[in-house]
Every structure is written in structure tokens, then in C-alpha cells.
Image (cartoon, helix red, strand yellow):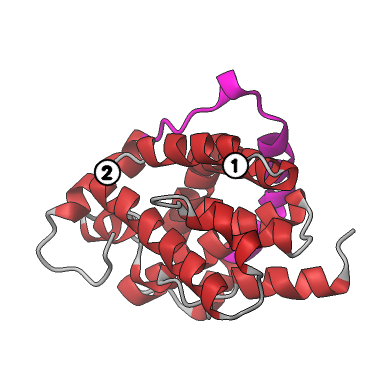
């Protein structure tokens, strides 16, 4: 169970209104649509479900779990190690720049609102380039958001941003977008459970289609999104 105040804070972290610039990124989705790989609602749904299952749930989400637990323990060394591993595993320059920009923006936000004492922020401030999951997990721990709830919010926010990018890029209506998010929501409990129990040697972000789409986007001449 999640306490009401913690739930409200999680909703704030997962909100599209969070000023970290998530709306400016499509993570290769724009390139996949431009290349004709994704043509309709079914294609978008399949793409998002595959990225969730084969990339996020097997690497980004398990890293998030480890970051959340490290912040809970006050283990800044482990935080730094998992942060560096996550940055090193970004497949393209765009994907790395995205998570660094969003992580820095969230850190600036948390510093600027006055909700945290300087000594609490110091471990996050000491990171040269905090990735977005690192900063998100920090806020979740400080706001007493349990791990599985925090990860669910993190993954749903990712999916919501991806669907929003698809709506802006192709003929995907809002009803179709909600159908996709309904499918994602149904899959999240199982993905969160598996991500939180995955062993280190089982982690992998091998998703070549996603990496290729991101590479193609880096040289795409006409584009709306930064990734």
C-alpha cells in the first residue's frame, strides 16, 4: 500500500506537467514512424509493448530498482555505480543526452522548490551527470514512495510520453491512444514484479530495432523531437 501523500507526490513525478522536458523526446519513435515501420494504432501498441518487455523491463527498470534501494540505504557509492552503468548502456548519443538532460532538470527542480534540506540533496548534487531514473528514484525515496509503486509510475510516464509523441507524429487519435495505454497498464504489474526480482546477470537492454531507430533519428533532416 502507498500512503496518500506519497501517492500524490508520485502522481506529480509521473505527470506530463513535470518540467523536465520529456515532451521533447520520442526515443526513436519518430524515426520509426517516418520510415514506415509503424503505420497505425496496432503497430504503435506492439512497438511500445516490445520496448517495455525487451528493453525497459530487462534493464532500465531493474537499474531503477537498484537505484531506489541504494538511495534507501544511503549508499551513494552504489548510486554512482548504477548511474554510470546506466549512462554507459545508452545505445546512442541522443538517448544518453536525453536521460542526462532530464536527470539534471529534475535535480534542478528538486533543488529549486525548497522542499528538501541541502544536506538531503547533497548526494544527488555530487553526481556529475545524474540520469533521469537516478533523480526520479531519489525523489521517490525521499517522498516515501515504495519501490514497486515508484517503478509503476516511472514506466507509465514513459509510455504516456511515447503515446503522446505518436499522437503528434501520425494519425493516432486520443481514443486509440487510451486503448494503447490501457494495454500498457494491464501489462505493468507483471513487468514491475519481474524487473524488481531480476538478477544482475539476467539484465540486458538488447533491442536492436530501438537502437537502429534512434541512430536513424540522429541524422533525420525533418523532425519534431530531440530523440
Q: Secondary structure at mark 1?
A: helix
Q: Which residue is mark 2?
A: 92
Residue 133, position as x, y percentages in the image: 53, 52
Q: Main secondary structure of the magenta part?
A: helix
Direction front: furthest residue: 119
Q: Which residue is mark 1?
A: 76
**Dot 1, how many residues are within 10 Å of its Cα: few (below 14), some (14-19), or many (20+)?**
some
Q: Is residue 98 magenta?
A: no
The residue located at (47%, 45%) in the rendering is 51
Quadrant for residue 135, please give it: bottom right
In this rendering, the count of numbered labels is 2
Q: Is residue 182 magenta?
A: yes
Q: Secondary structure at mark 2?
A: loop
Quadrant for residue 8, please give it: bottom right
**Dot 2, how many residues are within 10 Å of its Cα: few (below 14), some (14-19), or many (20+)?**
some
Compared with 43, 196 (above or below) is above
- Asked if one can make out residue 87 in the rendered structure from this viewpoint, the answer is yes
Q: Which residues are magenta?
A: 181-207
Quarter of the image containing the C terminus? bottom left
Amino acid at each position: 500500500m502507498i500512503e496518500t501523500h506519497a501517492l500524490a507526490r508520485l502522481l506529480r513525478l509521473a505527470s506530463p506537467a513535470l518540467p523536465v522536458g520529456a515532451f521533447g523526446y520520442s526515443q526513436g519513435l519518430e524515426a520509426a514512424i517516418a520510415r514506415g515501420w509503424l503505420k497505425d494504432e496496432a503497430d504503435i501498441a506492439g512497438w511500445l509493448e516490445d520496448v517495455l518487455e525487451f528493453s525497459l523491463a530487462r534493464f532500465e527498470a531493474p537499474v531503477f530498482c537498484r537505484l531506489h534501494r541504494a538511495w534507501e540505504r544511503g549508499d551513494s557509492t552504489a548510486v554512482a555505480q548504477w548511474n554510470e552503468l546506466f549512462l554507459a548502456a545508452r545505445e546512442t548519443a541522443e538517448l544518453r543526452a536525453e536521460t542526462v538532460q532530464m536527470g539534471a532538470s529534475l535535480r534542478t527542480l528538486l533543488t529549486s522548490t525548497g522542499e528538501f534540506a541541502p544536506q538531503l540533496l547533497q548526494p544527488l548534487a555530487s553526481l556529475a551527470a545524474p540520469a533521469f531514473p537516478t533523480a526520479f528514484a531519489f525523489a521517490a525515496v525521499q517522498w516515501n514512495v515504495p519501490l514497486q509503486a515508484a517503478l509503476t509510475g516511472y514506466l507509465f510516464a514513459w509510455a504516456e510520453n511515447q503515446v503522446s509523441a505518436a499522437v503528434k507524429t501520425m494519425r493516432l487519435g486520443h481514443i486509440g491512444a487510451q486503448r494503447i495505454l490501457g494495454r500498457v497498464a494491464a501489462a505493468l504489474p507483471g513487468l514491475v514484479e519481474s524487473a524488481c526480482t531480476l538478477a544482475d546477470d539476467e539484465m540486458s537492454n538488447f533491442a536492436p530495432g530501438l537502437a537502429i531507430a534512434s541512430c536513424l533519428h540522429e541524422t533525420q533532416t525533418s523532425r519534431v523531437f530531440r530523440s
